[in-house]
Image: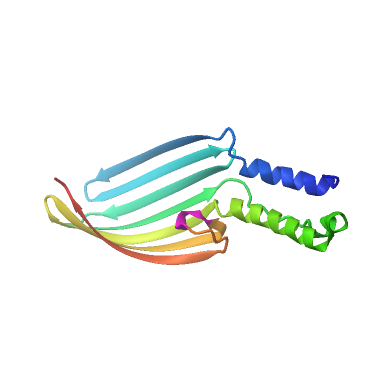
Amino acid sequence: MPLPAVADEAAALRRRLDLDGIWGNFSEIGVRQELTDWQWSAEFVHIAAKPLSSESSVALMLGRRIGDWTPYAGYGWAKTSGAALAPPSWGAALQPLLGPAGAAQGQALGAGAAQAYNATRVQQSSWSVGARWDFHPQAALKLQWDEVRVSANGAALWGHASTDAGRARVASAVVDFIF
């Protein structure tokens, strides 16, 4: 392409979205401690899918057992390393070469590619409070409330392609059985 600025940005987009030669790695380390009635845990996870993405997450939890009940609180965050891609501004540069319609199509293609990459990013944090009730030696009920905050260009864990910031409140009830 005879426009170096557009050609360079297009090449950078292609490198970020290129699936040729992709490889992955998953690493996790965690620790859990129970001291009489108190319990805590910490976990770190790193996922790399090079050259596409690299994500890290941390989860912390603190609880206290009171009879058959264990109230607890937790905090976690997950994020993709590196900055989100800004949509390129190719329209003005492409217009003399491609005309208004072609320039608009080129601009839309570049903006779509940047949005596709940004939709795969993770950038969120959450607070949790809950309680576990061990109502049977082989069963427990867990009630939990989560407040999740998602940053712009960070909603990939939510299964939709939005790049908007958002937040969610999640209530859950789970019964665990041991067989």
- Which quarter of the rendered picture does the C terminus lie within? top left
> Left or right: 23 with respect to 133?
right
Quick check: 2 above or below 136?
above
Report the residue at 52% width, 50% height from top: 79
Report the residue at 37% width, 60% height from top: 128
Q: Give the range drawn in magenta.
A: 155-159
**Residue located farthest toward the right when viewing the structure as drawn:** 96
Locate residue 72, reporting x and y percent: 30, 57
Report the residue at 49% width, 59% height from top: 160
- Chief SS of the magenta region: helix
**Does the image show residue 30?**
yes
**Does the image show residue 67?**
no
Locate residue 162, reporting x and y percent: 55, 61
Would residue 33 be counted in the magenta stretch?
Answer: no
> Left or right: 117 with respect to 5?
left
Report the residue at 46% width, 47% height from top: 57
Q: How many labels does the image show?
A: 0
Locate residue 65, reporting x and y percent: 22, 54
- Which quarter of the rendered picture does the N terminus lie within? top right
- State the residue in front, 31 or 88: 88
Quadrant hosting residue 151 = bottom right
- State the residue in front, 28 or 115: 115
> Left or right: 67 with respect to 144?
left
Locate residue 166, reporting x and y percent: 51, 65
